[in-house]
Amino acid sequence: MQGTDTHCGKHHKTYVDNLNKFSVSTEFADMPLIAILRATAGRPDKASLNHKIDRAFGGVDACKKELSAAAVEEFGIG
């Protein structure tokens, strides 16, 4: 199982690196993820993702379908 752990660890590192990159020069730069979630939950001025999903995919359901299709194509069913 070490291969799976290494694979997942690389994905996790990428997610953390991207969060750190996108939060540079913002009020969230030095905050842990849970603090960022608490600080932004329910704040309309921080809720631009839904708008971007609607514009790019036509809605959350369409986004889920496209992500699922891309995942199956990339990684297979198993």
Image (tube, helix red, strand yellow):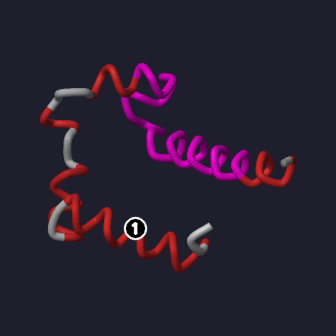
Amino acid at pointer 1: Leu
* Picture residue at 44% right of the left edge, 22% below the top: 34
Q: Main secondary structure of the magenta part?
A: helix
* Picture residue at 19% right of the left edge, 51% below the top: 50
Provide residue 75's location: percent of width, then percent of height. 61, 72
Provide residue 28's location: percent of width, then percent of height. 41, 28
Using the image as rendered, state which of residue 4 and residue 47 is in the foreground. 4
**Magenta segment: does it hold 27?**
yes
Seen in the picture, residue 73 relative to 56 is either above or below; the reply is below
Q: Quadrant of residue 63?
A: bottom left
**Magenta segment: does it hold 58?**
no
Q: Which residue is mark 1?
A: 67
Using the image as rendered, state which of residue 24 and residue 67 is in the foreground. 67
Could you classify mark 1 by the number of other residues whose Cα lies within 10 Å: few (under 14), some (14-19), or many (20 or more)?
A: few
Q: Quadrant of residue 44?
A: top left
Circle 1 SS class: helix
Q: Which residue range is magenta in the image?
A: 8-35
* Picture residue at 78% right of the left edge, 46% below the top: 5
Provide residue 4's location: percent of width, then percent of height. 77, 52
* Picture residue at 65% right of the left edge, 52% below the top: 11
Where the C terminus falls, by quadrant?
bottom right
